Amino acid sequence: MCMVRKIYAALALMNIYVLTLSSQTSDRDSIKESMNMDAVYDRPFLTFDKFPVNLGGYLEANSIYSIEDGLSEGLSFQARRLTLFVSASISKRIKFLTELEFENGTEEIAIEFASMDIALHPLLNLRGGIVLNPIGSFNQNHDGPKWEFVERPDVSTNLLPATFSNAGFGIYGKAYKEAWTLGYEAYLTNGFDTSIIDKEGERTFLASVKENSSRFEENFSGNALLNGKLAIKHRKLGELGISYMGGAYNRKEVDGLQVDTQSGRVDVLALDLNTAIKKTGTRFIGEMAYIWVDVPDTFTQQFGDRQVGFFVDIVQPVLKTEVLDWENAVLNLSLRTDYVDYNIGRFAQTNTNVGDDLFAITPAISFRPAPQTVLRINYRYQWQQDILNNPASRTATWYFGFSTYF
Amino acid sequence: MSKIIHFFIGLSLIALFGCENLGPEEPMEFELLDGPLDGLSLSEQQLFLAGDIAFNDDVFTVEKGLGPLFVGTSCASCHSGDGKGHPFNQLIRFGNNDLNLPSMLSFGDGRNQIQNKAIPGFEPETVPEGFPFSILVAPAVTGLGLLDAVPDANILALADPSDANQDGISGRPHYNIPPEFTKIRNNSVPQGNNYIFRFGKKAGSYDLLHQSVSAYNQDIGITSLYDPIDPFSGLEEDLEISTQTLNDVVFYLKTLKAPIPRNQTDPDVIAGKELFESVQCAVCHTPTLTTGFSPIESLSFKEFHPYSDLLLHDGRASSIEEAIELHGGEADNSKAQYLSLTPKEKSQLIKFINSL
């Protein structure tokens, strides 16, 4: 209970802070200065006259051809995602949005987002339901058509559990000062479970929590996951965000009986950056995450107690012209760098470095006949080292595909 | 406009037809341990593949029966890439060299290997206080099918229990009673109910099924039809691995190729090989063995070079030099000869061993 009180106290302090800021702000609509936190609403929707519901969605599909250490499984075609959005303005200051996703056909069907928002003030909005945890930037801003790459960043999918959503409640808001915008989000949601260190991948894997379908119904640990983000944006310089989420992942007691001796915590700190050089149109998008997990000393070192990773995308438009009937077609050259260390540390017995890391570069060419649609050719070259630091396994992968809003 | 279309079409064609040339090349065969024997039939290759998946990809979680006490979470976690283990997944076995104590120390169920890891909420085992113990790492699992197919008679031909040739090495096979689920080899030469054991640390297992059943049970805490007793509770439990999977793993282990020696034309390796003979390492570490008949044709009547004594290589040493220096007993003479070599000769000998 003490922990819950502290969390509520922290949220109350945050409220006071933002309300103080509000005296310096204009009364502009918070959506006008779009930030990463607005990504769920910053999408194209189909609207109908006098019909209060808007519809949208996106589809992405691709071909994939991989060669790992000289061996290939051949060519495959993937229908990765079909996502549907429905939003509605229920009444003044109350809105609703949901996102349903079908991955790989019907292999995984998920409600990624379903929330009701109540706007009290630009600085104070309430949100509840199934929310996307604001950790890093990709988790909230993950729509395929926004990216020049077929694969999602490794740090966002193999370290952080993108797309990670949970049942919970929280607040968010923005404040403005000239060219600056400050945004914040704070939520209490259900959290992780012990599957994060009990996984067939033989490594600490936060994303395994997504397989627990009852996480929308019951919080495994019984302790809320605290998730908060602070982001600052300058109209010319770009956006920088710092986010944190943390909480228990195990339970010490079941039906009043002690079943574990120690509380296991997960703590995640993430930084994200989104900027552009106006003169050249070059965009830089990046995210870095550092994870701490309490792994019992008596468990295997295969499961790391610290993980780190980052990705950086550089996107350079090289041609903007009219093609066929597309008036603003754009051709981009891009490069992504991925790095993930699944297990930071040294072996207790030998004091040598624990391996289990991944590095990849992905040059890409993308063609956008319209802003909502992207055709992509990616070539990814990956080096992956096992836990014992044996020579890296090398994988080259070709992708050709598209992603489009509809 | 047409430039973009042509560019995109051209690039797509390059991607489609040029991708083979932009992928990483296959490593040299001698760099890998995880390939099958040459000449497996199509059906044998399918069985090999099924075993490969079970051995390398099946990871046991709490839900799948891991532990609650264990050493590793999968076969591959101790035998990474089918090679030797690493000290982080070490095995710890205890014994007794105190004549005032009972001669055979073990837990109540006969085990003398501790399970030094535990799932959350459980405490791992520790070595009983005051008793000596050995820290071991898992051996490589390559070429075991060839060793399995060596007739007893060929092993007995190497034995010299009374040191009749007076080379200081007696050499005796390890006879014991195989568990009921094992299938006795056709060419066995028993002593009463006792048969030659040839796998595991100190040749503690009769065959690869026996070894696999024990490893699943004692290293991962997985119960099977052949050993349904959970080492933690001491009680019979539901099966946590199917008999089919066990058979697949055994077939995989039988048909993994032996490592391919490297740098065989290197003068230092050639000189090291001669030193290996001259300091009498080869008296115990038999350079060449021949298999008998096997229903797997690739294993039948094959000559191979295990450099094995079927007894040692217990993995206590962290380097080859340390392994040589840990030799004792009948190997004292060879160790002394090694220690009297010049630094260059020692280096050549170790280069030869590394080439294997």
Image (cartoon, helix red, strand yellow):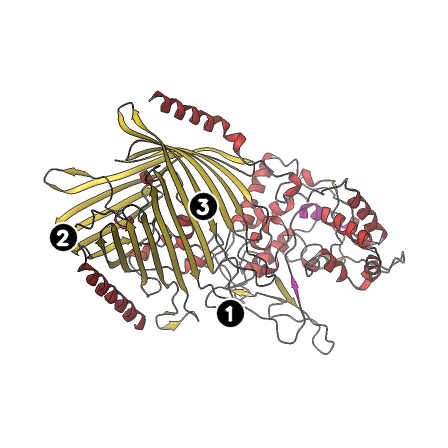
Closer to the camera, B33 or A12?
A: A12
- Measure how far apart labels 2 and 3 are at the Cα level: 40 Å
Q: Position of residue B296 (x, y in %)?
A: 66, 40
| Pointer 1 chain | B
Image-quadrant location for residue A251: bottom left
Q: Nearer the viewer, residue B2 or A245?
A: B2
- Residue located 29% across and 53% down the image: A232
Which residue has dot 3 on it? A338
Q: Is residue B342 left or right of residue B99?
A: right
The three-letter code of the residue at mark 3 reads Asp
Q: Residue furthest top?
A: B2
Q: Which mark is residue A378?
A: none
Query: Local crowd at mark 2 within 10 Å, few (<14), some, or many (≥20)?
Result: few
Residue B253: image location, x then y, percent: 62, 47
Between circles 1 and 2, the one closer to the viewer is 2
Measure the alpha-carbon separation of dots 3 and 1.
38 Å
Could you confirm whether marks 1 and 2 are on the same chain?
A: no
Q: Chain of mark 2?
A: A
Provide the residue span drawn in magenta.
B129-152
- The residue that disc 1 covers is B123
Which residue is most to the left? A50
Q: Does label 2 or label 3 sit earlier along the sequence? A: 2
Q: Chain of mark 3?
A: A
For the point 29% across and 41% down, which residue is it?
A83
Q: Is residue A256 above or below residue B268?
A: below
The residue where tag 2 is placed is A93
The disc labelled 2 sits on which kind of residue?
Arg
Q: Quadrant of the C terminus of chain A?
A: top left
